[in-house]
Amino acid sequence: MRLASDMDYKLVFAALETVCEDNLSVLCGTSEPPYGAITKRLVTCIKKIQEHGRALEPVVAGLTSVYHHYDFDAHTPGNGYRTLVKVLQSCLLHIIHKGRYIASNYNGAFFRADHNACEMEAYCNALCQLRALLHLAQRLINDADYGQLYALHDEELSHRLVQEYSSMHKACFYGRCLGFQFSPTLRPFLQTVVISMVSYGEAYGKQQSGLGMAALSLLTSGKYVIDPELRGTEFERITQNLDMQFWKSFWNLTESGLITGFNRIASNPVKVNFTLTLPPVSLRLPLASDPNLSVAVSPPIAHWGPGPVHVRLISYELREGQDSEELLSFSRTDPPPISMSQLPWVQKQPLSPSLLIHFHGGGFVAQTSRSHENYLRSWSKELNVPVLSVDYSLSPEAPFPRALEECFYAYCWALNNCHLLGSTAERICLAGDSAGGNLCITVSMKAMSTGIRVPDGIMAAYPATLLTTDASPSRLLTLIDPLLPLGVLAKCINAYAGEDCQTVQTAAGSGSLSSLGRDTAMLLSDLTQGASNWIQSFLDPMRTSGGTRSLSERRGDSGGGTSGPVSSPDSGSETIAPYPEGFEPLRSECLAFIRPTTCPVIRNPFVSPLLSPNNLLRGLPPVHIVASALDALLDDSVMFAKKLRSIGQPVSLTVVEDLPHGFLSLSQLAKETDVAADICVARMREVFRQESPTHTPHKRPKLEETYQSVNPSG
């Protein structure tokens, strides 16, 4: 079913009203309903849906009349207000579709009354919670400055967003309604991820090897397939309260030999793919303003002193320099990964004029270049350039600024040693997704402030440019997003800021899976006593943490309209959010404890580039941002693009539809993800094909167009 356009919202609400009336007519048409109590459930549910629909139509009308003022420009429709309306319409269309089925088949012999009642109740609950988000969005419009998506100076509003996340019921979005807002082809994948995460959470904390934990997870996953309500409840508890080590270990499952082996089989074969260790020695680079002068660049030193930086070189073609003894001396493998005697049929290609330097995503806390190897191989082939991906150290063991220092050092090393990487580096593009997009921007800022050559362009996919929990309309999606819940986002931010800093690891193991294994082993060793009950005790709704307490009872009715106001966990008396009289969203049995992102480091321009003063952004290379309309970080991209444009910086913004945060890692799963990946490739190709780079920020061509459609062939 195609999602209605923004201009069709009146038709959607009219169809909803018609479906509700038709269902009530059918369900109440006989004095003795054939399904007894189930029919009464359906009637109650339909009436609640009808009530929500009537209340929401004027709210949507108000948002649609103004949300175009928050777009990047007239050719790039996309911001959090549009997304909230889009998600609501998607929910309504699912309800309309299901309602029509019920009205047509209610008296049929094969009608599954209980199943259909559960489906409608689940979407009714989702509609109730979306109604709450739309009311919060109204508050944002009233409080934020005109055209601004963030209320950066309204700490009370941001606090209320956190408190709403802490208490609102979210399980309905992870059960029967899971992924309703995304492309239909991605929903089976999302279901697999959620079931895997819940099963892994149940096994996590038990004394099992990696293989044993995976086997135990497989055995327990069946019940979450059969019972979507149980799946939703458990996923809500896990995302709200499990610690950072759980998330690091789960996300790093993509590093397992089985998964990476499969990815290598499924992805493009390449001639060069090996890791290098760059020793911590001081570098000298010419100044961009006067190449006759040079500046010293020190190796990374934050937190534990000088240490090496690990990188991966990927190249579709074997090029000059890539098999040199000088480069292979940096290899971590023995014997060396490339030997011409072993590959006598391989013809070396000349140095490429271009070089792609990549910083991976993972919330600054997880994954390495191996996790992203699938699309990096494709990029190397499609762009015909060598790719250098940096395995920077991860938080919380290595908080800011260690990752930035390592990425900047790797960039500087590549400038000095591009001939070893198979490139002349006439053109250099930085590329990254999410946290990696942040590092692309901040590395370029650091290059400018140091006085050395800046890259020729940046391709940042769904970058994190504001590492806070400040309220914005797209950030409201963290209350329903299965891949980026607010609780997880806040943990990643605080870890990078050093709020959750743990014992410092040695530089040799930084960012590696071995260090993750050691950390996890230490964690599990402390949990030997009562390990089988660890998850339940950790997630006990009555467990108190930081002053947070559970509600006495979750509201069980499908509309949540009879609930009273909920008190702020830390104030004990103040109402969390102003909702219309008689309406209150559903509340959860298990409160989340969200540590506020109040650390001063968060406001550092090299942590949150959106907060940078203009003088730190002037002189950046062309920045190409590729964002998703359904990403909770969408407003980060829109506001950062607006800021760059306002100071005359070259910038383009493309907003793709129906995809979640992290869509690059989902390439080849669906047509939509392939199209989005092609857009990213096209942006990088533009950087490599721009006219003779001068390597001085003031002479760069200004890119004034914002592109909406892309020819992948360039």
Image (spheres, rainbow, N blue to C red):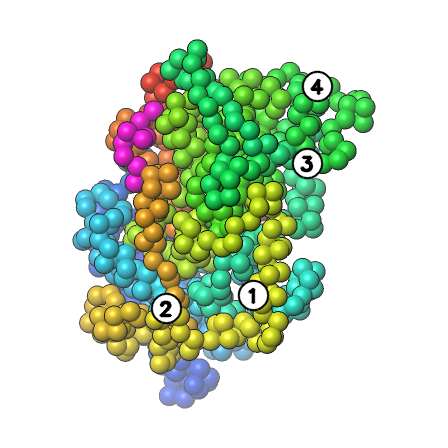
Report how many numbered discs are placed on residues in the image. 4
Q: Which residue is mark 3?
A: 332
Q: Seen in the image, is 359 located left or right of residue 583?
A: right
- Badge 4 element: loop
Residue type (three-letter) at the residue carrying disc 3: Arg
Mark 1 is surrounded, within 10 Å at the Cα level, by few (under 14), some (14 to 19) or many (20 or more) other residues, namely many
- In percent of width and height, residue 664 lies at 52, 42
- Badge 1 element: helix
Mark 2 is surrounded, within 10 Å at the Cα level, by few (under 14), some (14 to 19) or many (20 or more) other residues, namely few
Instruction: State the residue at coordinates (51%, 17%).
Output: 426
Instruction: State the residue at coordinates (39%, 13%).
Output: 290
Q: Which residue is mark 2?
A: 546
Whichever of labels 2 and 3 marks the residue nearer the N terminus, that label is 3
Report the magenta residues as a range.
610-622
Pick out the residue farthest to the front.
Answer: 305
- Label 2 to label 4: alpha-carbon separation: 61 Å
- In percent of width and height, residue 137 lies at 26, 56
Where the N terminus falls, by quadrant? bottom left
- Label 4 to label 1: alpha-carbon separation: 48 Å
Q: Which residue is mark 4?
A: 348
The answer to which image quadrant residue 556 occupies is bottom left
Residue type (three-letter) at the residue carrying disc 1: Gly
- Label 4 to label 3: alpha-carbon separation: 23 Å
Whichever of labels 1 and 2 marks the residue nearer the N terminus, that label is 1
